[in-house]
Image (cartoon, coloured by chain):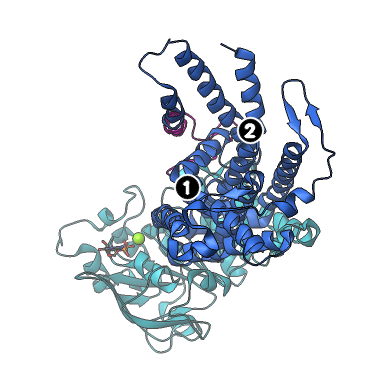
Chain colours: A cyan, B blue
Amino acid sequence: MADPTTEVKSIAVGSAGPGCKKVDPILVADKVRRQFGGLTAVDVEHVEIPRGLITALIGPNGAGKTTFFNLLTGFDKPNEGSWSFEGKDLAGVSPYRVARMGMIRTFQLTKALSLLTVIENMRLGAQKQPGESFLTALIRPLWIKREREITETADALLKRFKLDAKREDYAASLSGGQRKLLEMARALMSSPKLVMLDEPMAGVNPALTQSLLDHIKDLKSNGTTVLFVEHDMHMVRHISDWVIVMAEGKVVAEGPPSTVMKDQAVIDAYLGAHHDTDLGAVSPKTDTTTLRATAKETD
Amino acid sequence: MDILNILSLALGEMISPTTITFVLCAMGLSVHFGYTGLLNFGQAAFAAVGAYGMAIGLITFQLPLWLAVIMGLVCSAIFALILGIPTLRLRADYLAIVTIATSEVFRYFMTTIGFAKVTGGSNGLSQFGKQFWALNPIPEADYNFGFVTYRSDQLFVLIVGWGTIILGALVLRLLMRSPWGRVLKGIREDEDAVRSLGKNVFAYKLQSLIIGGMFASIGGMIFVLNLSNVQPQTWTTNFTFTIWSVLLLGGAATILGPIAGGMIFLALISLTQGIMGAMVEMGWLPFLSQPDVAQIRFILIGLSLMLLVIFRPQGMFGNKRETQFNG
Ligand SMILES: Nc1ncnc2c1ncn2[C@@H]1O[C@H](COP(=O)(O)OP(=O)(O)O)[C@@H](O)[C@H]1O
Ligand SMILES: [Mg+2]
């Protein structure tokens, strides 16, 4: 693994730390706060997501990761705060416009469109299909060419995600893991600039885990920025260039994976008051590498 | 009892102007509910708005028929906007409540004395059919089709009505196989997922409400043109629930479902009414009188709705699991 300090220099301005500035940020959030009654779910002072890299957003359950995703993509409204994507202010922008700007997210609770076939799910992910507007829809020659292009892209993605055999099946007939894959493949239909994946590995068959990791690395090599929420420390350590840690709504640590996982703030965040608990317990999969083991290996 | 008479009545009912109206309304509802997942319980009002819009255009504004029809459709679209803009951003049940309430409000509004000059009040409007009947090219005569005989004007309505249904079915088929239809189906499944893929869900729902409402409006126009009058008490919640029965019987997310559902449902209603009427007449059902028989129809509608939703939510022609009330 590369020396952490040179890694930091190429990504962050100055030293790594909560809210540190990035050399080339794609997404910048400022003072984003979301309260549910008395509970402050998200209270992020400042955070920047580096362009062209894979950033992991980690933190214990209830840390506010999903809520933060919802806020950034317009699915939820904060009490205050501002954020911008490629320099364009995004506060108050509706979810579909956020998506059209090239920032596509997936959901922690998978949203496969059950009674649409797998291929139709994929086609729906495409942008710029003139047949999606009412009047053009009636005149097939106006959209059939684009539909063929879309289908080609969709088939290529399905093949990559090993879902091509399921092409004509209803999404409802897929397993939980396959739906996660479908949702991710569908998100890629529009070649987004930034993909935000909320727990992409949850429920995915371990046999598919490696290929999913490869897909995410492929995204990066194609120039797509990835921000993902994950509990699986093995995955986080393996593929992310940068790790942001949230706890109780706040960003408590940031840095390259090798250093962040040894950070006392991170260990505290995960352990909370239970200092005697094994860090492995925070991972939903008890058979995967624990945080402690990860820290040891990278020592 | 006259079994042949009862049967031929039921057969005639299969293609009657009433059936045409319910089929068109159910086709519209299939766009709303079957394809988009919108719970519209005010489809009767869409039919009424179209019928009144056209009738008022013909009487008050003395418009030519084609323009009056367009006026009815424009009224229908405005009605959809009024219902949709405040509710379609909210959860699905809000639309259900608002549509059922608005359709009742609209019906009472039409009986209000203050507007009776235009709307005809509780008497409704009549004598606006001249232009329509003048279009009838069929020579005056009785046309015998074995089990039924039609006059030229009756035949004319049937041809116009079923022609409209076939045209409408073709348009729906085109729409639902297009990317536009795909977005609607996606919204039915999970609107947040569709939003996350960059589609303006609200605009699609509004379009769906307008298109489906227009089908009902055309159905309403044919209904009142056939009778040459429009009455406020026609467009009750019963009317809406008959449309729902037709749709659910046939299959909500299908093109042919509303057509077959309408033909079968209304024939069945006519059949049960005929048979029970005959049985009452012969004293086989001493606990029922003739007026009860007409009321029993509505019990049957309610019952069939319940049974359909429980045992066959996809309808007769629906794909397995194509339509559900939850999940
Ligand atoms: N819609 C909501 N209403 C009330 N509380 C919520 C809502 N959504 C999330 N929360 C609360 O906000 C906190 C953060 O939740 P979440 O963002 O889902 O955490 P994470 O994704 O990090 O596990 C939790 O305490 C959760 O209970
Ligand atoms: Mg979460």
Looking at the picture, tell me which residue is in the foreground, A244 or A107: A107
Q: Amino acid at mark 2?
A: Ala
Q: Amino acid at mark 1?
A: Gln
For residue B233, which numbered disc appears in the image?
1
Classify mark 2: helix, strand or loop.
helix
Q: Residue placed at 51% from the left, 86% from the top?
A: A87
Image coordinates of residue A135 in percent, x first then y, are 71, 63
Q: Chain of mark 1?
A: B
Is B303 located above or below residue A273 in the figure?
A: above
Which residues, given as a range, are shown in magenta?
B300-327
Q: Residue placed at 57% from the left, 41% from the top?
A: A170
Looking at the picture, tell me which residue is in the foreground, B259 or A229: B259
Magenta span includes B309 = yes
Looking at the picture, tell me which residue is in the foreground, B4 or A46: B4
Kindly tell me whether mark 2's CB lies below 8 Å from ligand 1.
no
Residue, disc 2? B260
Can you see residue A186?
A: no
